[in-house]
Amino acid sequence: MRREPLESMRLLIVAIPSLLSDFLLDRLLGVPSVARPASYTFTTIDVRGAVMTVPTSIVGVDYGPFRDGQSPDKGVFPSSQQLKDDMPVLKVIADAIRTFSTTNGFENIVGFAEQEGLNVAPGAWLSDNATTNALETDNLITVAQQHDNVLFAVVGSEAILRFVNGFPRGLSKNAVIAQINKVKANVSVPVTTAEPWHIWRDNPDLVNAVDFIFLNIHPYWEKQHIDNAVSFVFAKYTEIKNKYPGKKVIISETGWPSGGNPNGPAQPSLANQKKFITEFLKLVRKEKIDFFHFAAFDEKWKVAEPNGVGPHWGFYLSDRTPKHSIMTLRLDRPAVDFDGDGVSDIAVFRSGAWLFHDFASGAPNSGVWTGSSAGCIPVGMDYDGDGMANFTQFCIGAWHFYNSDGSYNKGIWTGGVAGDRPVPADYDGDGTGDVVVYRGGAWLFFNFTTGAFDAAKSRWTGGGGSCIPAPMDYDGDGSADFTQLCNGAWHFYNSDGSYNKGIWTGGVAGDLPVPADYDGDGTDDVVVFRGGAWLFYDFATGAFDSTKSMWTGAPAHWTGGTSLPAPLDYDGDGAVDFTVYSGGPWHFFNSNGTYNKGIWTGGIAGDQALSRRLLP
């Protein structure tokens, strides 16, 4: 798909976030616009007289597919089946993958990923070999033309760095730019190359040649101590972003090795890798940074890399098993997403059965049986960190955990005190839901692996029986915070349990806290549900926000109970939606409070809807 020049047009378009942008781009460019994945938003910019659409909200991972015993140096490459087998694992890890080559079968990765619903930034490997460069870029053009899941094209990876440093297989800047221009002339997606931060800093002509900056930042190679690693990444990202304010910047590589030898104060280890990942994910969520983490899997063929760290950059081991308790880079997964597709499921709990309905048709489409006892509270939580909600029940002191097929996994005894409430959430930002019980002002943590009470993590905030615990991420750092609504006063606490602030919300009987990220900005909003009204409060000022507040009403309950709010992301756009469950009918509303649709779920007394709001 050739990009037509628009030099004669005066483009005033800076951002067109609606479907109209696709229509206009089709008309202006004379080519079909690239399919927009539902999980991404886009920024439209004017680059050298052409409209380019650069993706944002990316949570990506760099994918090197070589398994044990395979090596490009030996000419032993993964089979097509092995590449296909990697796609479901990669989908757990991230929303998008980046590849480094389009030859030796790697050109097929884009199609395999498309079948799995994964977006791809395919890369052409550039070196000093003109023949292979031509084949790489020709194949890159082909896959970008043929597949709708291509986010952008990457022409080369550190080819200029290798050339400048005199390393093997390098390519001059001018030669790289020539290859970039070749690809640009034949595709309708953005085009870039990947280089370290200092190459971008020192080469503004390279910046001018690309549609956006694809930035490698490796604190290990910069001899940074692990305690300073993430702040170093942010500093270099900010430096480049400030130097080129007109260019979008996406981190193409960053990470930390789990093994090998030190590089000055930079010490590889499993613990340090997990520390880097955890702190980095908090940073990118808070600062809204788009990134690809290096790398998905360990690759043992990289033994020649200095300091012996080459085989140890993977988020997962080379056998595709996780290294850490955190199994996904996607910290913003929606509530009750049991299949990991990025969309909240429409799920009702009925006396031990978890019943699912298709949102589009409203029809029941599956169910899982775990069994139950009187008084048990269904709790959807991600206890294993795989990015998918798991089936669990809290039953008067015994917390039961189930596998995805409904079979029993394990139980944890939490004490059995009347009034206890399950409040699972990711309080430490490691991507895994913590096992936490709220008991009259105490937040009691239990270790999932051992089942033991964890006094070191547990916190006391105070609060009586009238208080409703409402864990939420009020500061956008990727970790749930302790909060509770007590007779109109919403109290917010720091991570050590000390008091932060309070907001007065009115104190009307029946008020329910429904904190969630309703605008998709990565921070949970302070919202109270009051008889059909969703009342928003500004966290910074504490003031009621009438512009964001919405009225949906609370239709009559089918079996005579009380209609309850059930916020969830039913359309997978990253923003939580307004829904109300009425004991059979489930009502779904648009972001402006207007009615979208209803789904009939059965109307059996005692049915409970699963949502972002914790039960009961």
Image: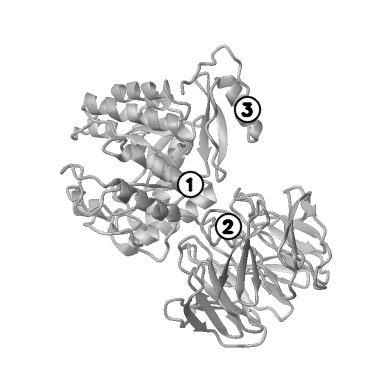
The residue wearing badge 1 is 117
State the residue position of label 3. 23
Q: Quick check: can you spot residue 263?
A: no
Disc 1 and disc 2: Cα gap in Å? Answer: 17 Å
The quadrant where residue 416 appears = bottom right
- First along the sequence among labels 3 and 2: 3
Do we see residue 385 in this rendering? Answer: yes
Going by the numbered disc 3, the residue's amino acid type is Phe
Question: Which amino acid type is shown beneath numbered disc 2?
Answer: Pro
Helix, strand or loop at disc 1?
loop
Q: Position of residue 478 (x, y in %)?
A: 53, 58
Task: Tell me which residue sits at (59%, 14%) in the image.
Answer: 9
Residue behind mark 2: 334
Quarter of the figure that contains the C terminus? bottom right
Q: x and y percent of residue 83 in the render?
A: 33, 48
The CA distance from mark 3 to mark 2 is 30 Å
Quarter of image, res 396: bottom right
